[in-house]
Amino acid sequence: MPLSPNLRPFITCAVTGSGGAQDRSPHVPRSPAQIASSAIDAAKAGAAIVHCHVREPDTGAPSRRPG
């Protein structure tokens, strides 16, 4: 049975950008509350998936801390 293509748009949004994106724009969310708000706004605008990188709230640097 051949597969048929899905022609409906599928929108994703990377709310925190990648790597050093926080240094390129003051609009990149940094705190958990800002990231959550941006993700909700993206979903309301039609994004099906939100991709984010956790940031240190004070510096915006990428973080891997569970806290």
Image: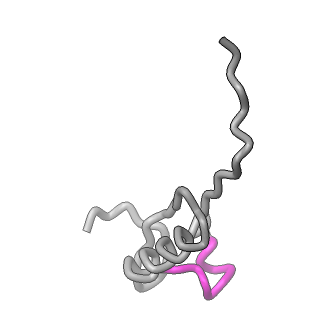
Membership of 54 in magenta stretch: no
Q: Compared with residue 1, is residue 67 higher up or lower down, i.e. above or below?
A: below
Query: Percent from the top left, x then y, of residue 24?
Result: 68, 79
**Residue at 62% across / 88% down in the picture?**
26
Secondary structure mainly formed by the magenta segment: loop
Query: Percent from the top left, x then y, of residue 25?
Result: 66, 83
Query: Percent from the top left, x then y, of residue 27?
Result: 61, 85
Figure colour scheme: one colour
Farthest residue toward the left?
Answer: 67
| Number of residue marks | 0
**Residue at 32% across / 64% down in the picture?**
65
The quadrant of the rendering that contains the N terminus is top right
**Residue at 59% across / 77% down in the picture?**
22
In terms of depth relative to the viewer, which is nearer, 20 or 17?
17
The quadrant of the rendering that contains the C terminus is bottom left
**Residue at 50% across / 63% down in the picture?**
52
What is the quadrant of residue 45 in the picture?
bottom right
What is the quadrant of residue 4 in the picture?
top right
In terms of depth relative to the viewer, which is nearer, 41 or 28?
41
In terms of depth relative to the viewer, which is nearer, 22 or 45?
45
Q: Compared with residue 9, is residue 23 higher up or lower down, i.e. above or below?
A: below
Membership of 26 in magenta stretch: yes
Query: Percent from the top left, x then y, of residue 48?
Result: 55, 57
Magenta residues (range): 21-30
